[in-house]
Image (spheres, helix red, strand yellow):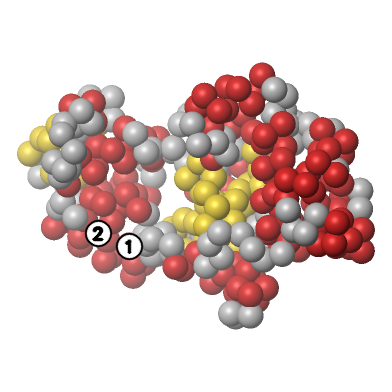
Amino acid sequence: MYYDITTPDAAYYWIYDTLQINHRMFWESYLLKCNKDIDLFCEMYAEQIEKIDIENIEIIAFQVTSNSDNCESVKKYGIRNLQWILSNDTELNKLLQRSGILFNVEQRTMCIDGKKYDIDYNKYKDRPVGREDKLESIAHKVYYDFQINGFFFCKDIADYSVICRMPEFLFTLAQFSKKAKLIEDMWIDQNDAYVVKYKAKVKDFAWFSFYDNEAAYSDDKIGNYQYLKNKLVALAVDGMNGELQKDVFAYMNQNTVILPKDILEIVRAEEWRTNVLKYFGEE
């Protein structure tokens, strides 16, 4: 069974399957015996939790995207990082190029109507705090925050950033260029939003999807992932009870590619939103 906390029902089934308990047993343990103390609950089911195979568990995440081809390019190429998108014949890159906006990822440059801009993030990141500018924001997106970003859970995808209307990168670019602002408006008019649900292994996710710092990840790996096992249980328990944070982010490693075979479902964003919000009485 996939580890899935995208809805309370999905989290519910994972808990019962993994811990081999039923509804009554869960509430007797969690509410009555542990008084909703997740640490005590994990201790109570330590034997079952220890059996979680972290190396092979398949975790469900999803990305919100928008396009004009009913996700045909996603079905063909899978989900790719921003550097790949800006280096290949993608819908966004073609639209940018037709408007005179060109990126050379390898040379770390951006050209707009023949004027070249340096977007080497290494030249920006060590500047004094408070000196961020619009070029730095673009460089940050292309060379630091370019991995596939998604969610393990999001209560209302329409509430998060601009992702249901356009790529976040296009919004960032539009703050710098009037031409990109025109593309932004065109994108909103001509594209539809979708949720792409996929599966991946723990090794495909960046450490900061689960840990506060890289040292904690390294220590937990040595310790047979005890922290991560408990964290997955804790998130699932909160998920089944409708008590997760509004957004639980899933960051992939920078070079991770979500292949078409790992895509489980593609749903129109509004349908996905309705199907999640109904659990919270907010349809």
Measured as percent of width and height from the top left, residue 53 is found at 78, 31
Quarter where residue 22 is shown: bottom right
Name the residue nearer the viewer: 71 or 12: 12
Q: Residues within 10 Å of mark 2 (few under 14, many from 20)?
A: many
Which residue: 34% across, 34% down? 144
Name the residue nearer the viewer: 282 or 268: 282
Which residue: 57% across, 39% down? 210
Up-down: is 149 above or below 127? below
Which residue: 81% across, 62% down? 31
Measured as percent of width and height from the top left, residue 83 is found at 36, 35
Q: Is residue 207 left or right of residue 163?
A: right
Residue 195 visible here:
no
Residue at the spot of label 2: 183
Residue at the spot of label 1: 187
Residue type highlighted by circle 2: Ile
Residue 11 visible here:
yes
Q: Secondary structure at mark 2?
A: helix
Which residue is farthest left?
115
Quarter where residue 9 is shown: bottom right
Up-down: is 252 above or below 196? above
Tell me, yes or no, whether the two marked residues, 2 and 1, touch with CB atoms within 8 Å: yes
Residue type highlighted by circle 1: Trp
Q: Is residue 97 left or right of residue 133?
A: right
Q: Secondary structure at mark 1?
A: helix
Q: Residues within 10 Å of mark 1 (few under 14, many from 20)?
A: many
Q: Is residue 188 left or right of residue 110?
A: right
